[in-house]
Amino acid sequence: MANPNHTSAPQLSASVNESLLRLLQQIPGFRSLAMRLPPIWYFRSTLWYVTLSSWFWPGTIRRGRHFREVLHGSFDDKELRARARRYLFHARLSKDLETTWNNWHHRNHDWIAVEGESHLQSALQQRRGVFLVSPHNFGFSKLVAPVLATRGYRVHRGGNGGRRGSKKRERWGEGFQLSWSYLDYKGDYWHRAQLLKAIQRVLAANDVVHVSVRAYKQGDEEMAIEIFGRKYFLDANWFRVFQLCESPVLPCFAVGNTHVPINIVIHPPLTAGKTRAKEFAEIQTRYITHVPEYGRMWKNIRLERERW
């Protein structure tokens, strides 16, 4: 199993501001220029921009304060400041990845790595389809489906988007023939039943279904995750779907390492049965403990902690 302790970030360097890249993406005739920019320039410029804005921009200052207050005492002051800067960096990236993906999907090997792909390939050899499961609001899970699609996999994204799904497809760029799709439901029981049928259909075709599991303040103790002194509980609905479908379920985390800004880590399959949720909760807890800067839930946790 891969070590989740990936903590490094690109070195501080000034380059092209990510707002300029977004502008170039939207103006006809300039996208070709944006596509020629080295991806690492974008990551370095974003880190520079976030570091600078953390000194004077109120929203960025508040966001960094939320992170530091929740994690105060878990790291020494110097380490906490460094992690807070990486947290702001990753939070900014999570908002802009669709723009960067449209620019650089054809060269994603320059800035994205996939670790543990052999686990996915072995699971697919069973011909029952595969679930990849990631945490909600942690890491760059939105990249998993498009990245794996560029590597030849048929990938579907489980979610509850309704009309949002078509907007997401548009943002991700249907122009270059995406081979992945959203499996949406609107929230009521009828649409959830339809979603289950759609999932069973694509699994029967030996496709991959990627889902991001939410965590709630109440739930089954077997699905508890620890987030720095507070328990949250994984959404049991998805684990019921896993049980019904009887396909392999592989944890998948999109974080970073020393070689590339983003690293998609695919773990071996979880044990089938009642222990599956507990196993995933333990893995997710390890990631959150070792690399909390990849989370985007710290403001809500801080506000909730005031009521503990």
Image (cartoon, rainbow, N blue to C red):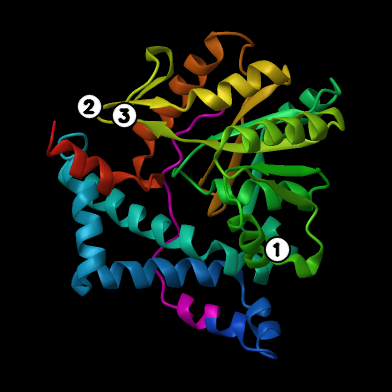
x and y percentages locating residue 147 in the rendered image: 69, 51
Instruction: Name the amino acid, label 2.
Output: Gly
* Residue span colored magenta: 1-22
Q: Secondary structure at mark 1?
A: helix
Q: Secondary structure at mark 3?
A: loop
Q: Residue 66 colored magenta?
A: no
Q: Residue at x 45, y 59 (%)?
A: 10
Instruction: Name the amino acid, label 1.
Output: His
x and y percentages locating residue 247 in the rendered image: 73, 21
Q: Which numbered disc, 1 or 2, marks the residue that appears first in the sequence?
A: 1
Residue 31 falls left or right of residue 87: right
x and y percentages locating residue 143 in the rendered image: 61, 51
Q: Which mark is residue 217?
A: 3
Residue 14 falls left or right of residue 207: left
Distance, label 1 to label 2, CA atoms, is: 39 Å
Residue under pointer 1:
105
Tell me if residue 13 comes above or below residue 136 in the rendering. below
Q: Residues within 10 Å of mark 2 (few under 14, many from 20)?
A: few
Q: Residue at x 41, y 76 (%)?
A: 14
Residue under pointer 2:
229
Q: Which numbered disc, 2 or 3, marks the residue that appears first in the sequence?
A: 3
